[in-house]
Amino acid sequence: MNDQPRIHLGSLLRSSDDAHAAGELDHLDYWQGKQRQTLRFARPAKFRVDVNSLGNDEMYLQGTFTPTLIMECARCLRDVEVPLQLKLGTLLKYDPSVDIPYLDEAESGEEILMFGDPDLDLSGYLAETSLLAAPLSVLHAPDCKGLCQVCGHDLNEGPCEHMAQVPVEEIDDELGIPEGKVHAKQNPFAALKDLDVPEE
């Protein structure tokens, strides 16, 4: 199993040969801004890439990547498996001044992956492609009850002492909690109701 996905493009830069790489990944380490991030997978994720020369230090990459991402439930933070079937396709351009590969926009408007090391690390490209294809948020179950924001108890495992103070039918997801009640879904604007604003 590969630690990081790499493809060797040295011979392709010197000739019109093609280059190929394939393997399995159990995670991806990549840079986001100046911070190193890790994309976790539920099981080994297969990838295959083929690169063809277009001349003038430009190439075209195509392939497939099938990760099953581990994301957090938006309500209770449990792990949720999100399978993806990705078709890869992007222009590549070699520029020896580039330290870390990054995505740019070509003059044609197409996406182009800039790189400076012929031993190309595809981690950032695969991570960004995966994150763009993934949903913004997921639930581990449609009826997930979430966490109590007072004590952090997982309400899917049963009510907590704060939940007992508010009948379920009185909880309004949009408007918050009836006045005088305490629970996770408190109205963030409740503290403003008694605000004394001087009249102009």
Image (cartoon, grey):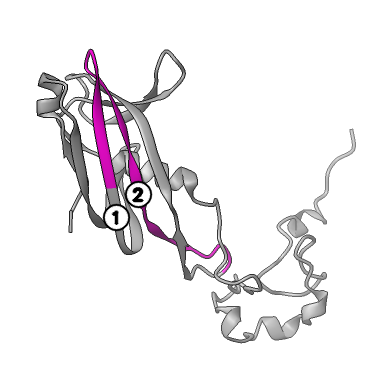
Mark 1 and mark 2: Cα distance apart in space: 6 Å
Residue 31, how many percent across, how many down? 30, 41
Q: Residues within 10 Å of mark 1 (few under 14, many from 20)?
A: some
Using the rendered image of the protein, determine whether residue 35 is visible from the camera's viewpoint. Answer: no
Q: Quadrant of residue 153?
A: bottom right
**Which residue is identified by label 1?**
46
Residue 105, how many percent across, how many down? 41, 21
Residue occupying image coordinates x 14% and y 22%: 13
**Which residue is identified by label 2?**
65
- Identify whether 57 is placed above or below 159: above
- In the image, is 191 to the left or to the right of 8? right
- In the image, is 144 to the left or to the right of 95? right
Magenta residues, start to end: 48-75
Majority SS type along the magenta span: strand
Quarter of the image where the N terminus is located: bottom left
Q: Amino acid at mark 1?
A: Lys
Residue occupying image coordinates x 82% and y 75%: 170
Residue 78, how many percent across, how many down? 48, 71
